[in-house]
């Protein structure tokens, strides 16, 4: 069996492979340990090798993202060796596996972006239902899985952690899944099925409230207000938009005041992430650089005992320095620029909400689940760029996108040039040769309609 034959088989069966890899990255850390590596890491390594053999053309954005992860990995491991911190082989392998698994998953998603976006929609529905169910059981009974930081605690804690280590990781992944269900259902499935997204949001909100995840609640509020302003509120109801925006701002201010004892030390950590650039000469401190730097500050009044960046974006400054940070920002801007070609809808806004949500976990470096959503945002950006404005909605349902035909303006211009503008108000059939909409009009065909080119249709001339 040669490699080309394996590649053809993968091209036919990459969809279930993508779903399994997504679920493994979202829930794989609960698998049992096998010597120094887990079953999850071995599975990811094998899947990545298979993804390389996948026979499918890749867009330019894929190579940009792959170049970023290669640069990020090599630069960070190199920066680690410049400073007196211990770097075990297991730690280095785990860090490399993040880049390998992310690029492999992205490669499988981009083989058929529209189809993969739809499949991931169902994955997120299942994830929201399962995680919500586990969270309710934990809250009511105080029972936790062995992977939770609250496992075996006496008295039992009623905080929901699901399959994650703590409540912040659990809440962030739950919100990301619920927001994707909400964004996809409202954009691609029409008004009749958009209730699915509202149910997903409704299921996640009690979990966020019990876990006191203000970042997740703020992200949900921003998403709902943005969606309503963009799609539901008409011009004569602009006052409602301002009222909703004002309500979100007031709620955010109240949340900041209530959570100020938690926010204040984090602000000091954020300031230290910027000042660390001067101490590392802009190169970063390598893997776990935030722990390495903050543990040496040794001032409880500044750090309050915190040794993590509490922001993935600023954690990159600690670990990888300014070059990787700027490269990452460039990738995010590229994703949003491609997504904007299909309109500034909620999925266009998702990378911003993604970065906001990653201010909640203490460390997102090894939180495998959020890399899955990063791949999804890249997949949608490629999908939107390929289809152009307005065509992605029709294409996602079938997995076979079609290009939108813009025929109205060309027909009107051709009619003017040919000197038949007088037929605009006549209502009779107008002979138009050189049709440039859905293909050339053949001889013996005309366009007829109340106005040439506006709602016109092609008919055979009798």
Image: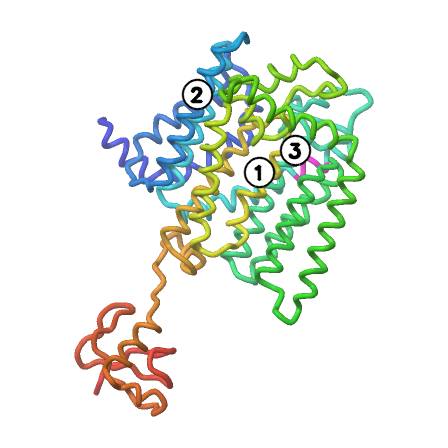
Give the image location of residue 91, x and y in percent.
Answer: 51, 14
Give the image location of residue 319, x and y in percent.
Answer: 53, 21
Picture residue at 56% right of the left edge, 43% below the top: 352
Q: Nearer the viewer, residue 323 or 197?
A: 323
Considering every residue shown, the one lying at the far left of the view is 443
Tell me the CA gap for discs 1 and 3.
Answer: 10 Å
Front position among marks 1 and 2: 2
Q: Residues within 10 Å of mark 2 (few under 14, many from 20)?
A: some
Q: Nearer the viewer, residue 336 or 193?
A: 336
Q: Earlier in the sequence, mark 1 or mark 3?
A: 1
Q: Nearer the viewer, residue 25 or 284?
A: 284
Give the secondary structure at mark 3.
loop
What main secondary structure does the magenta stretch of the protein show? helix
Name the residue that disc number 2 marks: 75
Residue 360: mark in rendering: 3
Q: Earlier in the sequence, mark 1 or mark 2?
A: 2
Up-down: is 375 above or below 421?
above
Considering every residue shown, the one lying at the far bottom of the view is 426
């Amino acid at each position: 069996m040669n490699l080309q034959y394996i590649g053809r088989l993968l091209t036919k069966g990459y969809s279930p492979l993508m779903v399994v890899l997504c679920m493994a990255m979202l829930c794989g850390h609960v698998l049992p340990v096998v010597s120094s590596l887990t079953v999850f890491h071995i599975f990811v390594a094998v899947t990545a090798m298979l993804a390389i053999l996948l026979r499918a053309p890749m867009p330019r954005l894929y190579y940009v993202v792959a170049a970023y992860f290669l640069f990020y990995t090599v630069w960070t491991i190199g920066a680690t060796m410049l400073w007196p911190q211990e770097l075990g082989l297991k730690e280095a392998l785990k860090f490399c596996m993040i880049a390998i698994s992310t690029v492999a998953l992205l490669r499988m998603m981009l083989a058929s972006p529209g189809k993969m976006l739809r499949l991931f929609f169902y994955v997120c529905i299942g994830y929201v239902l399962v995680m919500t169910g586990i969270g309710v059981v934990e809250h009511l009974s105080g029972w936790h899985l062995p992977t939770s930081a609250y496992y075996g605690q006496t008295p039992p804690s009623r905080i929901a952690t699901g399959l994650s280590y703590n409540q912040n990781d659990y809440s962030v992944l739950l919100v990301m899944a619920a927001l994707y269900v909400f964004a996809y259902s409202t954009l691609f499935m029409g008004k009749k099925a958009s209730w699915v997204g509202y149910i997903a949001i409704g299921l996640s909100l009690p979990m966020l409230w019990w876990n006191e995840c203000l970042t997740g609640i703020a992200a949900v509020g921003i998403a709902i207000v943005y969606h309503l302003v963009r799609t539901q509120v008409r011009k004569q109801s602009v006052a409602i938009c301002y009222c909703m925006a004002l309500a979100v701002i007031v709620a955010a201010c109240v949340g900041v005041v209530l959570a100020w004892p938690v926010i204040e030390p984090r602000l000091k950590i954020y300031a230290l992430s910027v000042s660390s650039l001067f101490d590392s000469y802009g190169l970063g401190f390598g893997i776990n650089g935030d722990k390495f730097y903050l543990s040496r500050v040794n001032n409880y009044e500044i750090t309050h005992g915190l040794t993590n960046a509490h922001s993935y974006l600023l954690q990159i400054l600690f670990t990888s320095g300014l070059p990787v940070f700027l490269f990452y920002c460039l990738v995010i801007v590229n994703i949003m620029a491609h997504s904007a070609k299909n309109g500034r809808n909620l999925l266009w806004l998702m990378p911003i909400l993604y970065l906001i949500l990653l201010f909640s976990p203490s460390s997102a470096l090894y939180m495998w689940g959020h890399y899955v959503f990063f791949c999804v945002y890249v997949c949608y950006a490629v999908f939107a760029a390929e289809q152009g404005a307005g065509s992605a909605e029709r294409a996602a349902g079938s997995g076979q996108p079609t290009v939108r035909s813009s025929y109205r303006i060309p027909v009107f211009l051709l009619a003017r040039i040919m000197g038949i503008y007088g037929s605009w108000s006549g209502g009779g059939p107008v002979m138009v040769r050189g049709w440039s909409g859905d293909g050339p009009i053949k001889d013996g065909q005309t366009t007829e309609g109340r106005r040439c080119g506006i709602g016109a249709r092609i008919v055979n001339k009798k």
